[in-house]
C-alpha cells in the first residue's frame, strides 16, 4: 500500500506537511498544541466570539462583487474561525495568523496598521479578543489596499460597514467605539502588507500535490466525478462542506464522525453560474459569496446577508450546507423557498431536481437517498424586473450573529392591485421550514387590500402550531409571524407604502 499523502499547506511562509490521520483536529488545536502558536486564542470554540480568527489564502481568479473576501495577487483571502475549521481543509492553501503580520525580523519594529491603530486608539484592555480583531481588520485593510491598487481614488469603508465586518468578533472589555476608531484610522495608514505575492508562487507549486485520500477515514476529492463516486460507494461517510455546523459536533458534543468526505475543494461545486432563467450556486460556494450574489439580483436580501452569522462563519460555511442541514430555524431555507429555489441532487452519474420546499420531510429528515448529495441550488430569476416583490426577515434576540426565533421569506407578484402569486415561507414555527398554505390561499386572486391581509393573518394562525423554547414562546412566534405579514402589506400596499426599513424596530443604533 502506498503511504497516504499528508496535508500540505503554507505556514509562516513555508510548506508544512501534516499527517491526515486525525481528520477532525481543528486548526486551532494544531496551532496552539502542536506549534505552540498561542497568539490565536480560544474563547467559545463554536464560531461565536472570533478570538480564534485566522486568515486562509487560496488561489482564485475572482470573488463575487459585494463580498468581504479579498482578491489580491490572485489569491482570495478570508477570515475564518480556527476553532471549528478542520485541519485537512487547509490542503493546498496558506494559513496566516496574528504572528505573521508585523514586519520581518525576530523583534519586528513595524506593526501592521491594524495592530498599530489598535494601540494608538486604546482598542485593547485584557487583549484576549485582540488577535481576532487584528486578523479581521488585516483582511479589511488588505481589501481596501487591493481596491486602491486598482482605483487610487477608492473610498474607504465607512463606520457602519466596518461594524458589519467586525460583527463576528466580540470584545468583553474595551467597548466597540475605540475598536471602530482604530478600524477607521488603520485605513489611512500604510505599513507591512500581507505577503501575498510570495504566497501565490508557493501555492502554485503546491497545486501539483495529489489530493488527500485515506480510505476509511478522510477524502478530499477535487472533481465532481470523484466526489460522486466516493459518495455512492460510501453512503455512510459524513459529507463536510464548511464545517460550521459539523465543527460544533466535535468541539461541543465530542462526537466521533467516522469517515469524512470533504467537498470544499471540488472545483465544479465552487462555481456560481448565471443561466438564462436561474442562478446556480454550487454546493461549495461560501455563504458570503452566495449572499453577495443573491443580493445583487434581489437587493432586498441585503439585510439577511448582513445579519446571517458573522463574516468568519460566512467565509467558511456554505449556503447548500445551510439548506442540507435541515434546521427548522435556518435562515437560508425560508427565503430560498419563497424564491422558488430547487435543489440539484446527484447520485453517481444520475441527477435529479427537487423543489426546495419538497426537500424537508420531517424534523432534520430530508429527501436525500443513500449515496446522494446536493450538487447545487438553482434560484429562478423571479426578480423585481419580472414583477416579483421579495422580502426576507430575521427576528432574533440580538441583531448581529444570532440564531433566529422566526425567519421568513416572502415572494409576491401583483397583477394590477390583485395578488397573482404568493409564496410565504417561515422558519421557527414548525419541525421544518415550510410554506403557509392557508395564508397563501387567502391572498391569491384577492385584491391587495387591508381586508385581504387580515384574512391571510387569520388563516396563518391555523397554518402553524409553534413551540415554546429558549428563544421565544409559542405566542411570540405566532404574533411575530402575523406582524411580518403586516410588514409585507405596509411596505407594498398600493397607496402610501412605508419603506420596509422604517418598519423595523431593531435598527442598529449609531456607534
Ligand atoms: C457562530 C455561528 C453563527 C451562525 N449563524 C447562523 C445564522 O445566522 N443563520 C443560519 O441559518 N445559520 C447560522 N449558522 C449555522 C451554519 O453557519 C449554517 O448552517 C451553515 O450554512 C452550514 O454550512 P456548512 O458548509 O458549514 O455545513 P457543514 O457543517 O459542513 O454541514 C452541515 C450538514 O449538511 C450536510 N451537507 C453539507 N453539504 C452537503 C451537500 N452538498 N449535500 C448533502 N449534505 C450536505 C453535512 O453532512 C452536515 O450534515 C451559524 C453557525 C455558527 C457556528
Ligand atoms: S474560539 Fe470563539 S469563535 Fe473560535
Ligand atoms: S480587550 Fe478584553 S475581551 Fe476585548
Image (cartoon, grey):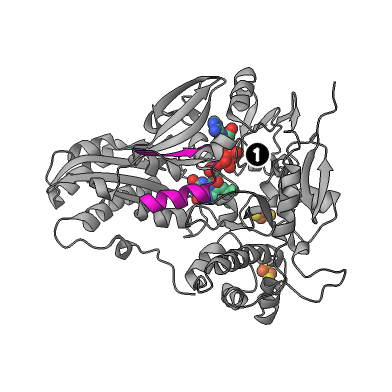
Q: Name the spot of residue 239 as percent of width and height, x first.
A: 61, 31
Residue stretch rendered in magenta on the structure? 276-297
Residue 278 inside the magenta-drawn segment = yes
- The residue to which callout 1 is attached is 249
Residue found 68% across the figure and 81% down from its top: 120
Q: Name the spot of residue 289 as percent of width and height, x first.
A: 51, 49
Quarter of the rendering containing residue 127: bottom right
Residue found 72% across the figure and 66% down from its top: 128
Q: What is the secondary structure assignment of the residue under circle 1?
A: helix
Residue found 40% across the figure and 53% down from its top: 296
Front-lying residue, 407 or 356: 356
Q: Name the spot of residue 502 as percent of width and height, x first.
A: 30, 65
Front-lying residue, 464 or 499: 499
Residue 158 inside the magenta-drawn segment = no
- Compared across the picture, whether 309 is left or right of 265 comes to left
- Ligand 3 is found in which quarter of the picture? bottom right
Direction bottom: furthest residue: 120
Residue found 45% across the figure and 46% down from its top: 331
Quarter of the rendering containing residue 300: bottom left
Front-lying residue, 108 or 422: 108
Amino acid at each position: 500500500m502506498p503511504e497516504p499523502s499528508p496535508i500540505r499547506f503554507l505556514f509562516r511562509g513555508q510548506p508544512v506537511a501534516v499527517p491526515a490521520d486525525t481528520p477532525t483536529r481543528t486548526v486551532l488545536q494544531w496551532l496552539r498544541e502542536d506549534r505552540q502558536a498561542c497568539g490565536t486564542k480560544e474563547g467559545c470554540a463554536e464560531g461565536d466570539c472570533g478570538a480564534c480568527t485566522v486568515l486562509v489564502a487560496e488561489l482564485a481568479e475572482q470573488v463575487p462583487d459585494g463580498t468581504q473576501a479579498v482578491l489580491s495577487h490572485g489569491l482570495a483571502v478570508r477570515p475564518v474561525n480556527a476553532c471549528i475549521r478542520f485541519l485537512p481543509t487547509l490542503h493546498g492553501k496558506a494559513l496566516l495568523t496574528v504572528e505573521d503580520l508585523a514586519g520581518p525580523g525576530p523583534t519586528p519594529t513595524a506593526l501592521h496598521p491594524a495592530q498599530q491603530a489598535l494601540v494608538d486608539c486604546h482598542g485593547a484592555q485584557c487583549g484576549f479578543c485582540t488577535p481576532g480583531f487584528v486578523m479581521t481588520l488585516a483582511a479589511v485593510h488588505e481589501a481596501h489596499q487591493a481596491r486602491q491598487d486598482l482605483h487610487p481614488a477608492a473610498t474607504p469603508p465607512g463606520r457602519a460597514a466596518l461594524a458589519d465586518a467586525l460583527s463576528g468578533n466580540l470584545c468583553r472589555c474595551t467597548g466597540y467605539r475605540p475598536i471602530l476608531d482604530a478600524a477607521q484610522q488603520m485605513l489611512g495608514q500604510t505599513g507591512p502588507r500581507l505577503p501575498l505575492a510570495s504566497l501565490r508562487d508557493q501555492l502554485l507549486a503546491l497545486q501539483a500535490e495529489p489530493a488527500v485520500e485515506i480510505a476509511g477515514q478522510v477524502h478530499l476529492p477535487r472533481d465532481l466525478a470523484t466526489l460522486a463516486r466516493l459518495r455512492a460507494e460510501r453512503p455512510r461517510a459524513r459529507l463536510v462542506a464548511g464545517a460550521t455546523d459539523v465543527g460544533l459536533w466535535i468541539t461541543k458534543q465530542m462526537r466521533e464522525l467516522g469517515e469524512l468526505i470533504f467537498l470544499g475543494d471540488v472545483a465544479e461545486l465552487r462555481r456560481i453560474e448565471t443561466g438564462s432563467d436561474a442562478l446556480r450556486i454550487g454546493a461549495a460556494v461560501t455563504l458570503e459569496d452566495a449572499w453577495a450574489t443573491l443580493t445583487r439580483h434581489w437587493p432586498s436580501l441585503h439585510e439577511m446577508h448582513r445579519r446571517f452569522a458573522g463574516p468568519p462563519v460566512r467565509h467558511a460555511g456554505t449556503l447548500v450546507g445551510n439548506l442540507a442541514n435541515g434546521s427548522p430555524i435556518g435562515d437560508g431555507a425560508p427565503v430560498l423557498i419563497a424564491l422558488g429555489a430547487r435543489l440539484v441532487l446527484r447520485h453517481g452519474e444520475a441527477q435529479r431536481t427537487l423543489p426546495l420546499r419538497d426537500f424537508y420531510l420531517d424534523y432534520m429528515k430530508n429527501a436525500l437517498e443513500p449515496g446522494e448529495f446536493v450538487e447545487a441550488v438553482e434560484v429562478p430569476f423571479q426578480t423585481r424586473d419580472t414583477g416579483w416583490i421579495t422580502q426576507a426577515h430575521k427576528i432574533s434576540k440580538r441583531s448581529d450573529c444570532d440564531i433566529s426565533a422566526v425567519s421568513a421569506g416572502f415572494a409576491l407578484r401583483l397583477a394590477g392591485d390583485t395578488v397573482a402569486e404568493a409564496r410565504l415561507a417561515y422558519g421557527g414555527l414548525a419541525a421544518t421550514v415550510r410554506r403557509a398554505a392557508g395564508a397563501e390561499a387567502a391572498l391569491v386572486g384577492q385584491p391587495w387590500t387591508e381586508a385581504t391581509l387580515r384574512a391571510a393573518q387569520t388563516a396563518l394562525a391555523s397554518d402553524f402550531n409553534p413551540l415554546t423554547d429558549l428563544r421565544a414562546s409559542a405566542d411570540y412566534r405566532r404574533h411575530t409571524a402575523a406582524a411580518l405579514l403586516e410588514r409585507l402589506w405596509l411596505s407594498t400596499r398600493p397607496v402610501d407604502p412605508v419603506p420596509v426599513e422604517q418598519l423595523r424596530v431593531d435598527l442598529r443604533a449609531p456607534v
